[in-house]
Image (tube, rainbow, N blue to C red):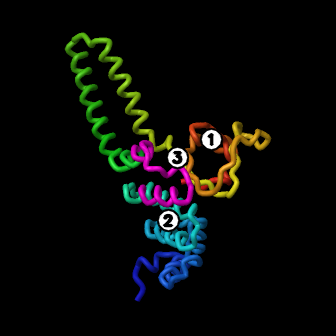
């Protein structure tokens, strides 16, 4: 008798699960990706199966892409280190266990608690200032500046996830240009599987940070995470 969960799954996903269980990983991966393209949500199990399938196939860029998507949902140091090791062995960059990636890991793990702490602290300071105003006590100018900078910092911290985005290059030859135009000179060429930080977009172009420089690449040359 079929379970409710099985009945709720699209037929293609049931077939994909059966193929994966039978060891036909490449065929299963194609069905999983078709289901994703059709708008079905990616479950954690699906992401891990896709990563495993492409690991068996030897497609390192797609393996790293699906591990990175999984890591974004479940930040874990073991996953970060595994991606770093795989990337280092295959000469790919962007997955290093450096300060930036560890900061992102820390933020994903504890960001919500830090936001709540900062909000509570800000509420306390606000109540203190309101109390002083009602009592007509003098509020020192430097205290006002401290509160202003605190609020700006809180705003940046809360909106940090929206400002940070990354992606994995999806083609063997990805042209990096200094301007968002196909007529702009090619500044560099990188291969498939590198992870880059995305700092905005313009039309069909993404602005990325690569080797401490800002470049533009076409959107169709990257799998956005």
Question: Which residue is the site of mark 2?
Answer: 42
Local secondary structure at mark 1: strand
Tell which residue pokes out farthest to the left in this image.
135
> Residue 20: image x %, image y %?
51, 79
User: Quick check: 94 above or below 155?
Assistant: below
Q: Which residue is drawn at 48% across and 66% down?
A: 47
Local secondary structure at mark 2: loop
Total marks placed: 3
Residue contact at pointers 2 and 3, CB within 8 angstroms: no
- Alpha carbons under labels 2 and 3: distance apart: 19 Å
- Alpha carbons under labels 1 and 3: distance apart: 11 Å
Question: Which residue is the site of mark 1?
Answer: 207
Looking at the rendered image, the disc whose residue lies closer to the viewer, 2 or 1, is: 1
Span colored in magenta: 80-103
Q: Residue at x 39, y 49 (%)?
A: 105
Judging depth in this view, the residue of 119 and 136 nearest the camera is: 119
Q: Residue at x 48, y 61 (%)?
A: 67
Tell which residue pokes out farthest to the right in this image.
183
Q: Can residue 103 be seen in this view?
A: yes
Inspect the magenta stretch and tell me whether residue 35 lies in it: no
> Residue 191: image x %, image y %?
65, 54
> Residue 70: image x %, image y %?
45, 60
Neighbor class of circle 2 (other Cα within 10 Å; few <14, some 14-19, many 20+) is some
> Residue 184: image x %, image y %?
76, 39
- Alpha carbons under labels 2 and 1: distance apart: 27 Å
Judging depth in this view, the residue of 52 and 31 nearest the camera is: 52
Residue contact at pointers 2 and 1, CB within 8 angstroms: no
Neighbor class of circle 1 (other Cα within 10 Å; few <14, some 14-19, many 20+) is many
Local secondary structure at mark 3: strand
User: Quick check: 59 above or below 151?
Assistant: below
Question: Which residue is the site of mark 3?
Answer: 165
């Amino acid at each position: 008798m079929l379970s409710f969960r099985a009945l709720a799954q699209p037929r293609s996903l049931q077939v994909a699960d059966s193929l994966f269980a039978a060891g036909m990983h490449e065929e299963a991966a194609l069905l999983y990706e078709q289901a994703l393209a059709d708008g079905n949500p990616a479950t954690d199990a699906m992401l891990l199966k896709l990563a495993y399938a492409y690991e068996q196939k030897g497609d390192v860029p797609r393996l790293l892409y699906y591990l990175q998507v999984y890591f974004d949902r479940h930040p874990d140091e073991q996953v970060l280190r595994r991606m770093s090791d795989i990337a280092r062995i295959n000469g790919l960059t962007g997955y290093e266990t450096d300060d930036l990636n560890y900061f992102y890991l820390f933020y994903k793990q504890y960001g919500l608690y830090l936001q709540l702490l900062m909000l509570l602290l800000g509420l306390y300071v606000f109540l203190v200032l309101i109390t002083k105003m009602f009592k007509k006590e003098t509020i020192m100018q430097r205290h006002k500046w401290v509160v202003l900078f605190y609020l700006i910092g809180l705003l940046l911290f809360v909106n940090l996830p929206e400002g940070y985005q990354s992606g994995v290059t999806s083609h063997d030859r990805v042209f990096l240009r200094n301007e968002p135009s196909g007529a702009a000179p090619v500044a560099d060429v990188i291969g498939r599987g590198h992870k880059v930080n995305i700092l905005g977009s313009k039309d069909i172009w993404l602005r990325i940070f690569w080797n401490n420089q800002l470049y533009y690449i076409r959107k169709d040359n990257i799998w956005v995470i």
